[in-house]
Amino acid sequence: MTTLIGQYLMTKSRFKKGLPMPFDRTRLPDPVSYFESRGQKIVGKRGKHFRTTCAIHGGDDDNLSVLRDTGAFHCFSGNCGAHGGDVISYAMQADGTDFVTTCKALGAWVEDGKPPGNYKPKPLPAADALRILAHESMLIAIIASDMCRGIPIDEETKDRLLQAVGRINSIQGAYQ
Ligand SMILES: [Zn+2]
């Protein structure tokens, strides 16, 4: 019996061709390591949140509060107020890079198992972001439809579902 998921998996490579999809959230650095790698001082490393300087507004105070687990951040400097959901969102705002460039720089972009090559920074066009959202929501709908028909999901599909949620969250973070 060919399930909708089966059909999806069979055409996955075709889907992939037209879409900038090799994003792997699990390869993102943990927030503490990431901010340390930028040379930013970490305050309160053991708590749920830590504080550090905010390269988005360039101040030298420790007004950036970062959630240790997810990298969600908020800058409490009066004129800044920058915020986002993860280190990708932070890097995009601090460095002015687009989503794909940022993911490559963070090592979370793997194309055919190859390390990232040379690429030119350019802003992520809104049309591309919407295309990814449309694709991921279609995928979620297909899986939901199979589940409603009593077809259990396997580990690969579950992981793909989590990846879809990660992608949607990243795009949301990128446009905050
Ligand atoms: Zn700031």
Image (cartoon, rainbow, N blue to C red):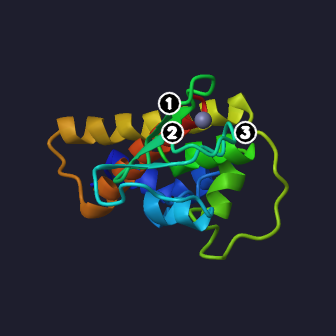
The disc placed on residue 41 is none
Q: Position of residue 132 (x, y in %)?
A: 58, 39
Q: Quadrant of ligand 1?
A: top right
Q: Which residue is mark 3?
A: 124
Residue depicted at 36% across the width and 34% down the height: 141
- Report the residue marked by disc 2: 63
- Judging by the rendered image, the residue that carries numbered circle 1 is 76
Q: Position of residue 155 (x, y in %)?
A: 26, 62
Q: Which corner quadrant holds the N terminus? A: bottom left
Type of amino acid under label 2: Asn
Pointer 2 with pointer 1, Cβ within 8 A? yes
Amino acid on which the number 3 mark rests in the picture: Leu
Q: Earlier in the sequence, mark 3 or mark 1?
A: 1
Q: In this rendering, would 34 be left or right of 127?
A: left
Picture residue at 41% right of the left edge, 51% below the top: 163
| First along the sequence among labels 3 and 2 | 2
x, y percent for residue 118: 82, 67
Answer yes or no: disc 2 within 8 Å of ligand 1.
yes
